[in-house]
Image (cartoon, rainbow, N blue to C red):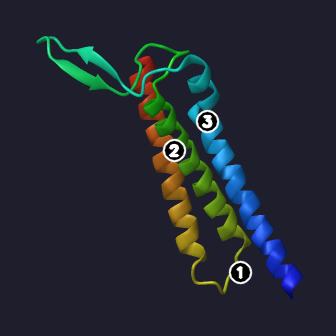
């Protein structure tokens, strides 16, 4: 009995480690350490006022720190939605949470994909 609990504990820790590693890699931590970009930028509007800027517009190979963290969070949203849909397919028909898991997973994935699309639209000007 103790072996099963230990294995479940190890599986959960490995999953959390993989998710955190994925988050950090997608956030561009290596890029941030090498290039040391600012957390946020500034831009001047047509009236001469300085406005904070979180997305480096028009730059395909440059990013702010906040931009990378936000994009990484959106990718984690999509991934977690896919995991929830997968868990829903593994549940039995008698489990009452199956439809909720499936619907919430699809909604989270759809919202994440829409945010990634909007993010790319702002960044690259599609």
Tell me the crowding category of disc 2: few under 14, some 14 to 19, or many 20 or more residues within 10 angstroms, Cα based: some
Give whichever of discs 2 and 3 has the lower sequence position: 3
In the rendered image, the quadrant that contains the N terminus is bottom right
- Residue 125: image location, x then y, percent: 40, 18
Give the vertical position of 100 relative to 69 (above or below).
below
Residue 73: mark in rendering: 2
Mark 2 and mark 1: span between their CA atoms? 31 Å
The numbered dot on residue 92 is 1
Horizontal relation, residue 23 to residue 53: left or right:
right
Give me the residue at 58% from left, 56% from top: 81
Question: In the rendered structure, which disc, 2 or 1, sits on the residue that comes first in sequence?
Answer: 2
- CA gap between label 2 and label 3 equals 9 Å
Image point (50%, 55%), residue name: 108
- Residue 61 location, x and y as percent? 56, 15
Q: Name the residue under label 3.
A: 26
User: Dot 2: what SS?
Assistant: helix
Residue found at the far left of this picture = 47
Residue at horizontal 57 percent and vertical 79 percent from the top = 97
- Where, quadrant-wise, is the C terminus in this rendering? top left
């Amino acid at each position: 009995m103790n072996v099963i609990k230990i294995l479940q504990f190890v599986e959960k820790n490995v999953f959390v480690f993989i998710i955190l590693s994925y988050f950090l890699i997608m956030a561009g931590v290596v890029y941030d350490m090498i290039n040391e970009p600012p957390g946020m930028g500034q831009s001047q509007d047509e009236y001469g006022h300085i406005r904070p800027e979180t997305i480096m517009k028009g730059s395909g190979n440059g990013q702010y720190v906040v931009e990378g963290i936000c994009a990484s969070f959106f990718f984690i949203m999509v991934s977690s939605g896919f995991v929830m849909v997968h868990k829903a397919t593994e549940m039995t028909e008698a489990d009452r949470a199956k439809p909720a898991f499936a619907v919430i997973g699809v909604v989270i994935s759809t919202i994440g994909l829409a945010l990634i699309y909007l993010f790319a639209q702002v960044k690259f000007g599609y």
